[in-house]
Amino acid sequence: MLIAPSILSADFGKLDSEIRAICDAGCDLVHVDVMDGHFVPNLTIGPVVVGAVAKAASKPLDIHLMVQNNTFFTELFAPLKPKYLSFHIEEEKHPHRLIQKIKSYGISPAITLNPHTPPQSIEYLLEELDMVLVMSVNPGFGGQSFIPSTLKKVEILRKMIDSAGLKTLIEVDGGVNDKNVSALKDAGVDIVVAGNYIFGSSSYKSAIDSLRV
């Protein structure tokens, strides 16, 4: 299981040291939530702050766009060269075109599914994707409880990917902790995003290690 701490739960008053701490603790990716206050009822950070995060991080960035006008935000953040850039299928009218645009920057494209969005909605796009991000909470805020139906959704998605002979990764974000991570692994998850569980712990390394099942 790969671990991607969400900096949404970090102490922004000492963001540089927080980023260095999770990287030193052994995380695999640094998950960055970009919210525009329109697609979700919250507003987070722009490219200047994310650029600072990229400089502090010794691990690749995993940028999750929760925005309207995905193309605009893709062009805004692409120069930072994240490993993954994910956008919400619910907000994109031309997903195939946007996937190709993300690829043109040398970035791995990913699509995000809200809790109510069925995995079948992106079946025709799976071969173009490097990752699917499944939201296990309603996006917009950290600290929410895990939605149990996510497990069934992941199982369906895993079968779709495997039956097509693809290597598309599955990432889950929302309410992840040491109590549900084994079930997520069994369902077919490759990467977990954890915010409060890691940044709210007394030892980032211990929290990250406890998620490696």
Image (spheres, rainbow, N blue to C red):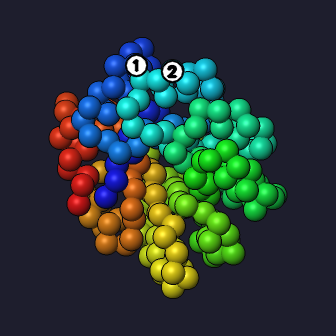
> Mark 2 or mark 1, which has the lower sequence index?
1
Q: Position of residue 195 (x, y in %)?
A: 38, 39
139 and 20: which one is in front? Answer: 20
> Which amino acid, by three-letter code, is at mark 1?
Asp
State the image quarter where residue 11 is shown. Answer: top left
9 and 169: which one is in front? Answer: 169
**Residue under pointer 2:** 52
**Residue under pointer 1:** 16
As drawn, 126 above or below 33: below
Q: Residue at x 49, y 53 (%)?
A: 137
55 and 199: which one is in front? Answer: 55
Q: For numbered disc 2, what is the local secondary structure?
A: helix
Q: For numbered disc 1, what is the local secondary structure?
A: helix
Q: Residue at x 44, y 45 (%)?
A: 144
Mark-to-mark CA distance, 2 and 1: 8 Å
State the image quarter where residue 58 is shown. Answer: top left
Q: Position of residue 198 (x, y in %)?
A: 30, 38
Quadrant occupied by the C terminus: bottom left
Q: Is residue 40 left or right of residue 170?
A: right
